[in-house]
Structure formats: structure tokens, C-alpha cells
Image: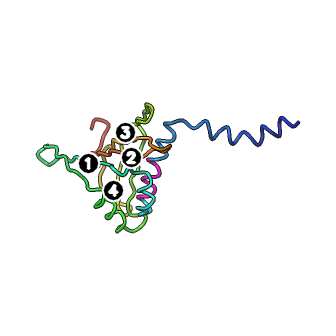
């Protein structure tokens, strides 16, 4: 009987330790977009490396791809000025891989602004695990109006 009672109390603790590195990485990305949706830049900063690099690609009407550096300060300022709930990036986890302190994440997305579809694309994240926590080190995305499996 004592063993059953002990197992009852230990089971939740055992489940916590069974979380994989991939699960932890997914949670960082979920936290990033949850904080963005609520316009909580302080919470967003907790998952960003202090030396994060952000870039975006867009394809111009003549099909020429353009790569642009994104200022983290400008990005977070824009999020802070946006009403909570206005920014809604709906992602799918297509790839999550880890190797020691390095992780990559590939998330196709659809972006909605104030409830209206705006654009779509793919996010590519690289994360680094430092001092016991995962942080986003690099983020690049594609942006286009129409997405399909062939894109």
C-alpha cells in the first residue's frame, strides 16, 4: 500500500523529467508567439538570446527574392505598440531537431492581423541552450500572400 501511495505522489515528478529537448524547444517557440499575441515584449525577451539575429525574405512581384535585416529593437517596439490580440501567427511544427546545445525549428505559418489574414510563409529558428535554458539565436522567415504545399 505504501508503494502505491509513494508512486501516486512521484508520478507527476517522473513525468516532468520525461520532457525531451525537442519538447523544451517547442515550448520556447510557443512562448514566443504567445507573448507576441499578447503584446508582452518583456516575456518575448525571456526567450531571445541577447545576441539574436533576425532577417526576413520577401519575393518581389518580379520574382526577385530580397533579404532584409530586422532590427530586434524595432520589432519589439512594433509589437509593444500593437494592441494585445492583434498579432496572431498560427504555426505548425514541421521540424524540430536538437544536438546538444543547438536546435533548429521549421514552422510554416499563417499570419493574421486584427483577425484578418495578412500573409504566410515559413519561420526558420536556430536556438542555443545556455545556462540551462533554450533561447532563440537566429530567426529568418519567408513572407508571401499565398501559400500552398508546392511553395
Q: Which mark is residue 55?
A: 1
Q: Name the residue under label 4.
A: 117
Label 2 vs label 1, nearer the camera: 2
Q: Mark 2 points at which residue?
A: 136
Badge 4 vs badge 1, beta-carbon distance below 8 Å: no
Q: Mark 3 points at which residue?
A: 106
Q: Position of residue 12 (x, y in %)?
A: 69, 42
Earlier sequence position, callout 2 versus callout 4: 4
Q: Residues within 10 Å of mark 3 (few under 14, many from 20)?
A: some
Earlier sequence position, callout 4 versus callout 3: 3
Q: Position of residue 45 (x, y in %)?
A: 41, 56
The magenta stretch is 29-36
**Residue found at the far left of this picture:** 62
Q: In which quarter of the image is residue 79?
A: bottom left
Label 4 vs label 1, nearer the camera: 1
Earlier sequence position, callout 2 versus callout 1: 1
**SS at circle 1:** strand
Q: Quadrant of residue 73?
A: bottom left
Q: Residues within 10 Å of mark 2 (few under 14, many from 20)?
A: many
Label 4 vs label 3, nearer the camera: 3
Residue that appears at 65% across and 39% down: 15
**Mark pair 2, 1: CA separation:** 13 Å
Q: Quadrant of the C terminus?
A: top left
Badge 3 vs badge 1, beta-carbon distance below 8 Å: no
Q: Nearer the viewer, residue 140 or 52?
A: 52
**Residue found at the far top of this picture:** 99
Amino acid at each position: 500500500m505504501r508503494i502505491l501511495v509513494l508512486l501516486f505522489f512521484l508520478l507527476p515528478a517522473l513525468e516532468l523529467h520525461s520532457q525531451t529537448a525537442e519538447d523544451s524547444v517547442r515550448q520556447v517557440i510557443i512562448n514566443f508567439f504567445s507573448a507576441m499575441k499578447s503584446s508582452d515584449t518583456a516575456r518575448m525577451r525571456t526567450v531571445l538570446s541577447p545576441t539574436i539575429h533576425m532577417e526576413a525574405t520577401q519575393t518581389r512581384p518580379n520574382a526577385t527574392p530580397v533579404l532584409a535585416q530586422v532590427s530586434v529593437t524595432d520589432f519589439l517596439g512594433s509589437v509593444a505598440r500593437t494592441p494585445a490580440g492583434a498579432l496572431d501567427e498560427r504555426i505548425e511544427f514541421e521540424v524540430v531537431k536538437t544536438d546538444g546545445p543547438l536546435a533548429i525549428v521549421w514552422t510554416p505559418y499563417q499570419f493574421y492581423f486584427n483577425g484578418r489574414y495578412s500573409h504566410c510563409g515559413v519561420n526558420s529558428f536556430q536556438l542555443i541552450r545556455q545556462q540551462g535554458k533554450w533561447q532563440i539565436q537566429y530567426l529568418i522567415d519567408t513572407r508571401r500572400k499565398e501559400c500552398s504545399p508546392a511553395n
